[in-house]
Amino acid sequence: MLSALDKYVIIHQRTFMIAENVKKILRELPPGVELEAAAKGHTPEEIEEAIRAGIKIIGENYLQEASEAKEKISLPAKWHFIGHLQKNKVKKVVQIFDMIETIDSYDLAIEVNKRAKNIGKIMPVLIEINSGKEPQKAGIMPEETIDLIKKIGPLKNIKILGLMTMGPWLDNPEELRPYFALTRRLFEEITALNIPNVEMRYLSMGMSDSYHIAIEEGANLIRIGTKIFGPRKR
Ligand SMILES: *Cc1c(COP(=O)(O)O)cnc(C)c1O
């Protein structure tokens, strides 16, 4: 059995490790690339440690977990929703998050727009691209993206600020390169179209195993969980 002191030492080693991880990644990032800590399954204390070490954006997949963490954390950070967004969660998600990275349908955008309008907010969003064109996966198909963005653009309480993609699950991160490249080409194509109320500022792609490749392919927002917090506990 662990003594109280053992537990104290373990907790502090873990938070020390988080701070070291954050600082190391930040040191090595090229200018213009922002680091988002993907916090699913981690405690408010661990998230707070990451913020203290220099994290400015927290990514959360789960509404409940995020609202509990936000209540306990007083340090400033931007909170991004990066999970699958169900319609019945939109109201609360619009209230507590600074950005939603996973808009992939007009229906969902309509709901976000409505809920944002009710509270007088203009909700920043990214459009999630299904860059692997996998039928069961979240995200809009690449070839349908421009039409979707043109439809969402006129919604007054939504502001499109870029694209996000996950890419397929592959063992070798190098194999993700074509999916990142495809998303980047789309990003550039949409930028060139100058669609009203659409600003292509963020290209969110790359996780712990793939962020170097994502940056080479143009990502300027990377979402890292494991390499900051260690393995997930839930
Ligand atoms: C969990 C998660 C990440 C981070 O994944 P790691 O491999 O732990 O770095 C990034 N983006 C999304 C959408 C996630 O759900």
Image (cartoon, rainbow, N blue to C red):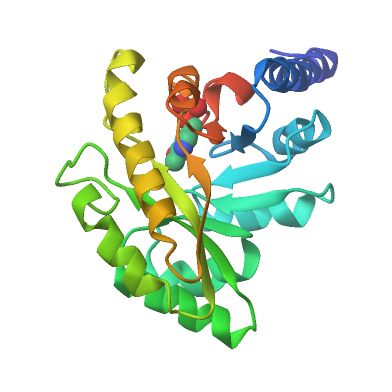
Q: Position of residue 12 (x, y in %)?
A: 81, 19
Is residue 160 or residue 85 the one in the foreground? 160
Say above or below: 9 vs 113: above
Q: Position of residue 114 (x, y in %)?
A: 47, 83
Residue farthest along the left direction in this orientation: 135
The N terminus appears in which quarter of the rendering?
A: top right
Left or right of 56 in this view: 104: left
Residue located at (55% from left, 29% from top):
225
Q: Position of residue 209 (x, y in %)?
A: 45, 18
Is residue 200 or residue 109 the one in the foreground? 200
Residue 146 lies in quadrant: bottom left
Left or right of 130 in this view: 93: right
Q: Is residue 87 visible?
A: yes
Say above or below: 179 vs 14: below
> How many marks are shown on the rendered structure?
0
Q: Position of residue 204 (x, y in %)?
A: 49, 40
Q: Is residue 234 visible?
A: no
Say above or below: 100 vs 188: below
Residue 164 lies in quadrant: top left
Residue located at (62% from left, 25% from top):
229
Is residue 124 or residue 58 the one in the foreground? 124
Is residue 207 or residue 228 the one in the foreground? 207
Residue farthest along the bottom direction in this orientation: 118
Residue located at (85% from left, 15% from top):
5
Left or right of 145 in this view: 4: right
Residue located at (50% from left, 25% from top):
215
